[in-house]
Image (spheres, coloured by chain):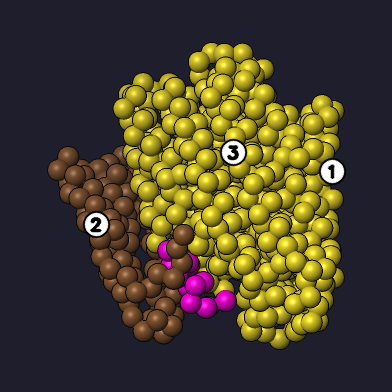
Amino acid sequence: MIIYILCFVLFLVGLYGVVSKRNLIKIIIGIAIMEYSINLFLIMIGYIEGGTAPIITKGFENAKFVDPLPQAMILTSIVIGLATTALLLAVAIRLYQKYGTFDINKIKDLKG
Amino acid sequence: MNSLIPLFVIIPLGCAFLMAMLGRFIKNINKFITPIFMLFLVYLSLSFIFKSQGSLIYKVGGFEPVNGVPIAIYMVMDGLTKLILLVISLVGFLAIFYSLSYTKQYTAERKFYVLFSLMIAGMNGIVISGDIFNIFVFLEIAAISSYALVAFGVEKHQLEASFKYQVLGGIASLIILLTIALIYWNTGTLNIADISRQLTVNSQAGTNVFLKFISILLIAGFGLKAAIFPFHSWLPDAHSSAPSPISAMLSGVLIKAIGIYVIIRLFFNMFPLSYEISMTITVLGTISMIIGGLLAIGQWDIKRMLAYSSISQIGYIVLGLGIGMLVLVTGGNKAVAALSITGGLFHLLNHSIFKSLLFLSAGAVEYRTGTRDMRKMGGLSEVLPITSRTSLIGSLAISGIPPFNGFFSKLIIIIAAIQAQYYVLAFLAVLVSVITIAYFMKLQKYTFYNNDGSKWIEKKIKEVPFSMTFSMILLSILCLIMSLLIIPEVRTIFLQPAVDVLINSAYYTTKIIGI
């Protein structure tokens, strides 16, 4: 049980980074940490104590297999995470070119 | 017709790929391909509405269920799906036709059409998939392309809005992924119909505390995507900074397809209905209806006002659906619940038409005058006669003036609220309708009237090009035609199948698992 709680703590660490940090890059790192914690959580769901890779070979037809579906889901979510992070960084670089700073206190033209 | 279902994803996805490859060599190919395939999607969704009955299922890869457990990815086409698909393709076609002239101001025109097609593919995918993980994947496709489209002009404000949108959208996506992981942990399946069965049959999986936790997380995740209060703060920035056809798509279709639709589908068809969750949804809808309306009054940026008005109108839709949920869960009259849900769905349909019309008109004004500040406008009806008329029709429709469509959908919601004896909600709905008239009168007065427009005549401002006026005129005609949905015979074709799916919550599950 403790490991799930630690995983949730990791999620909250990422959320803390997004909410409290003032630097664009640190916010992006916060989002990345949240994403990793959820990927970790997904892989733990599929894990079974003493399980092997889910490939049926001769002599191991009745072995204990780990659940392969979360693994497929994580591969997809990692790729999606790559796309979101790349786009976030691209926009952050463009923002730096326009404003000359990464500080979000100075980047607030839009309000009201 | 089952085998035609995946075409809704394949066509836009394939065209996006094709355009990204060929656009480099053949000039303007994107401008031909995109409207043509959007028109084809309109035809396809209409033919599904008229020719097919009940739910159609397509199993990807053709894997049959093993021992009654579905193992393939399911694509489901039922009444609600058909309705949303029609809205997506219709508004998408008109928005892309409008962009043919509008995008001339950008240097990377080609990429606009590619991203647009990807967004359409994502939205269609969400609507037809019957599997929560696929909903997540398509949601990310739609969301990532919309982030890029919001920042398309790469000016200061657009980048800032896009960054804000991406951070909040990213958090929402992660919350949704966490929820999917939790659901899989407890039920061992990802298929919506199968999850629904597991939650009812398997009492251990469907414990009350677990269900509440999941529901709250889902409301937070999809509420962020749909910009329901208190998750609305990104919407005014993103929707007002985006290029106008994209604002029309985002406000008109995207927040409904990736926010409202998924909330409806999951809470009506997947979870057993519960009083607390229905109450939460209704209250959030009511608050966002009021807050959006009040915040819109003070705005001077024309597109920002429309964006706040979107929050308010989304509140109406959620209110209608929430009252339907409440009536169903308290065991009230089913006819009242059906009426309320009809009102909510009807307003969803109407809002996508008139809000895209208003955004396109605002875009036309910005295209010619180069400003979005209402204080610098005035008298534009002299030089932009068509835009002024279409914008007036859109304003009348959204404020609920008969004979336009907005009147009828608001009327249905208010009547349903009274019949369900939620008098306070009915009163608030009427009040917000009055507020809506107030800020649209402000918009009309300051933008198009207020002075004789000699400033603009001197500058030799002309009416916008044909492709832009065509879309706006067609949308204003649709504003009138949609009123016909109030006639019962027409309603049975379009709205009734969608309402039936939602009213009989168990029907969806039995239909899919039973086959």
Q: Secondary structure at mark 2?
A: helix
In the rendered image, the quadrant that contains the C terminus of chain B is top right
Circles 1 and 3 on the same subunit? yes
- Residue span colored magenta: B153-164
Q: Is residue B53 above or below residue B2?
A: above
Q: Which residue is mark 2?
A: A16
Residue B140 shown left or right of residue B91 in the figure? left
How busy is the neighbourhood of tag 2: few (under 14 within 10 Å), some, or many (20 plus)? some
Q: Amino acid at mark 3?
A: Val
Which chain is mark 1 on?
B
Q: Are labels 2 and 1 on one chain?
A: no
- Residue at 40 percent across and 81 percent down: it is A99
- Chain drawn yellow, letter? B
Residue that mark 3 sits on:
B432
Q: CA distance from mark 2 to mark 1?
A: 50 Å
Tell which subunit mark 3 falls on. B
Of labels 2 and 3, the one closer to you: 3
> Which hue belongs to chain A?
brown
Chief secondary structure of the magenta span?
helix
Front position in the image: B448 or B398:
B448
Where does label 1 land, which residue? B481
Q: Is residue B258 left or right of residue B380?
A: left
* Badge 1 amino acid: Ile
Is residue B222 visible to us here?
no
